[in-house]
Amino acid sequence: MKQSLSLDNAAPERESVAVEGAASVDKARYRKVVIASAMGWGLDGFDHTMFALALGAILTSLNLSIGIGGTISTASLVASALGGMFGGALADRYGRARVLVWVVVGFSVTTALTATAQNATQLVIWRTLEGLCFGAEWPVGVALLSEYAKAESRGRVMAFMQSAYSIGWAASTIAYFVVFSMVPAGDAWRWLFVLGLLPAIAIFFVRRGISDRISSAGAHKPASPFASIARLFHRDLRRTTLSATVFLVGAHGNYYAIVTFLPLYLATERGLHVAGTTTFMLVQIVGGFIGYVSSGWFHDCFGRRPTQTGAFIFAICSVFAFLYTPVQSPGLGYVLVFLVGMSISSVAGGLGAILAEQFPTVIRGAGVGFTYNVGRGIAAFGPMLIGFMASRYGLGWSMMVVGICLALLSTAALWTLPETRGKEIIREGEV
């Protein structure tokens, strides 16, 4: 009798230990998912930013104009629209974690193959294929991580993932400095792209121990990626899909107006060489990292729409100050480019949380992928427009005008979407 009583009293203790053990496993898996999603986006940043850094050397080596350079950037970004649209839909059908590996390997290999380009046609081919894979990575990572994040801290978690892009960008900038300092520019850009294979190696270590939050039994998977995309245009989601797409056209366009041509602007308008350009870019990237992380805190505290609107205003003011303030010393230039990096990254920091909260779980990958990447594809015509405007109006003025117009467009579209701060995005029984 005493033994029975003892066992009965021990039962709640054993149950408590079991619950704590399960919670520990969940926390461990959550940490792995955060690291995997952030590393995937950081590795994406490492590969994708190489093109802007090497653009000047590529144009000279292959005897191409700035307009052609902008067109090649546009081709890659347009391809990313298709890649992202189907990448997110594939993640809905086959799983977030599995598709994440596919796309990281894809953009790594195609980035390395860019080193073999001998003319504009070959360059377009490899950058287009890279764009297909590059576009797919972000929506897959967002869908995976957003479903693990708590509603009250999702803005911070998604902004942390976004901040990894700055780390990848910093790594590619350092690689640019090292390679271009050791090898003549005509060959250095090729060696730089060969380094793009590194993410393909890293992803095999990242992939271990991560899995989807949604169980296969709990999620009613779409019959095909096409069915997932078609669902976005049913009556209940059509307006959300269109508004979110326009919102991303402006957000991406504002970002590309600055980032695509900033290294070239520093070299041609400010007369900086490799070392000077690298220093300015690293200062901008540090500012960008701070902008990403801090924007998540503001999104969780003040809401998606007010924070995003403030970020656009900050971006317009900081870019204007950078382009039109007479710089008498490097110190002032560093302060201004730091603010540019911080502001344009604060615009991007909230995108993951905003989009993930707009779509139901079963098609979240497709919703995030379609709106983010179709928006990116349309916005990709911005660099091409700037490239051709620059020959008449100057590079700085063209960057400024296009950036402002697209920021205004994005803000208007944002306010047609609902405020979703604190929204639970997974229904009971789905996990």
Image (cartoon, rainbow, N blue to C red):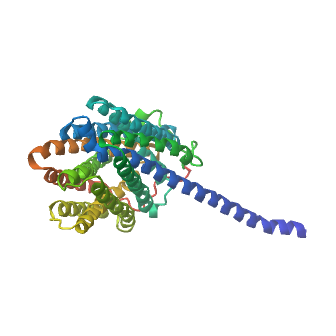
The foreground one among 399 and 247 is 399
Q: Residue at x 44, y 48 (%)?
A: 43
297 or 269: which is nearer to us? 269
In the rendered image, residue 145, in percent from the top left (x then y), is placed at: 48, 52
Q: Count of labels shown?
A: 0
- Residue at image position (70%, 65%) is 16
- Residues 357 and 154: in front is 154
- Image height check: is 290 above or below 229? below
- Residue 348 drawn above or below residue 126: below
Give the x, y percent position of residue 97: 52, 44
Residue 360 image point, x, y percent: 43, 48
Can residue 238 be seen from the camera position used here? no
Residue at the extreme left: 392
Residue at 23% x, 39% y: name it: 60
Q: Give the quadrant of the N terminus.
A: bottom right
Q: Residue at x 65, y 58 (%)?
A: 22
Measuring from the top left, give residue 344's x and y in whole percent.
29, 58
Query: In this rendering, would 212 be left or right of 82?
Result: right
Considering only vertical position in the picture, is 130 above or below 417? above
Q: Is residue 327 visible?
A: yes
Q: Along the horizontal axis of the image, is 61 left or right of 38?
A: left
Residue 114 figure quarter: top left
